[in-house]
Structures are given as structure tokens and as C-alpha cells.
Amino acid sequence: MNYIYVLIIFIFLPLFAIADLPSKQQKEVEHLLDFVRNSHCSIDRNGSKHKGKDAAKHIKKKYDYFIDDIKTTEDFIRYSATKSTMSGKLYEVMCPNKNTIYAKTWLLDELKSYRKTKSNLLTNKD
């Protein structure tokens, strides 16, 4: 019987972790995770390259670990997707036909674009 409770906790725990952020930030974090997951880019973590799906999984894992320190979407990027906690080495993103860029810059640029699109949608509703 106890294993059922453990199973329920593991199924719903990720939902509660994201629920700690305000609704607007939840949507932004979810967008950024989807952005990484669906990207055709590779993220270099400590000399090891990871495709979008694996990179998003790693970022989500770090997000869950640092959830108590994360209050904004920018905090999410800083704590979860900027650098290795172990080595301190910055994550780099390599996209086809583009220059290598730091993951922090890449995600902050995407966040800015996402917010601008959302703002335009709200403005055009009126």
C-alpha cells in the first residue's frame, strides 16, 4: 500500500515544483524548457555535448534542486541553465550555421522574445 503513495508523490512532485513560481513565470519556465527540448542546437556541459531533449532534462533536474532559490524566470536561467555547479564552467550552445553562444545569453534572448510576443498579443487584443 505504501508504494502507491510513493508512486503518487513521484508522479505529481514535478507539478508542485513548477507551482512554486507565480503563474506568469511558470509559463515562461515551461516555454524555455520546451524551447531547449525542441531546439536543433547542442548544449556543451563540461566538454560533453547534449541535444535538446537531454539538455532540457538536465536543466529541469537542476531546476527541481534549486527551486527554493528561484523566484523569477531569470533566477531559473541563472541557477538551472547557466553553468556547471561542479566545475563552474559556463554552458555553451552550438546551433547549426550560427556562432557558439553562452546558454545564459541564448535563453535570456529567447525569454525577451517570448515576453515581447506575449505583450504584442495582449496589446493587439484591445
Image: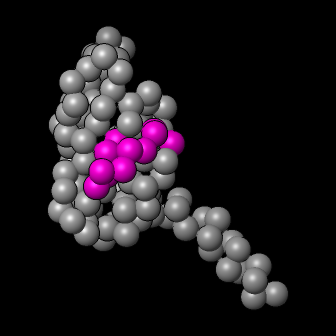
Q: Residue furthest right?
A: 1
Q: Main secondary structure of the magenta part?
A: strand
Residue 123 rendering spot, x and y as whole percentages: 27, 16
Query: Which residue is at a point 55% across and 67% down the rendered structure image?
Result: 13
Towards the viewer: 5 or 80? 80
Say whether residue 24 is visible. Answer: no
User: Which image quadrant: the N terminus?
Assistant: bottom right
* Of residues 110 and 121, the one drawn nearer to the viewer in this rendering: 110
Q: Is residue 67 above or below residue 94?
A: below
Where in the figure is residue 28, as x and y percent of width and height? Answer: 35, 40
Q: Nearer the viewer, residue 44 or 79?
A: 44
Q: Extreme bottom residue here?
A: 2
Q: Is residue 111 above or below residue 87?
A: above
x 31%, y 16%: residue: 97
Magenta segment includes 52: yes
- Give 66 or 89, whichever is nearer the viewer: 89
| Residue 120 visible | yes
Q: Which residues are magenta?
A: 43-53
Relative to 16, residue 120 above or below: above
Tell me which residue sits at (75%, 83%) in the image: 3
Quadrant position of the C terminus in the picture: top left
Where residue 90 appears, as percent x and y from the top left, is 19, 51
How far across and how far down the image is residue 119, in percent?
27, 23
Any magenta on residue 5?
no
Q: Residue at x 68, y 80 (%)?
A: 6
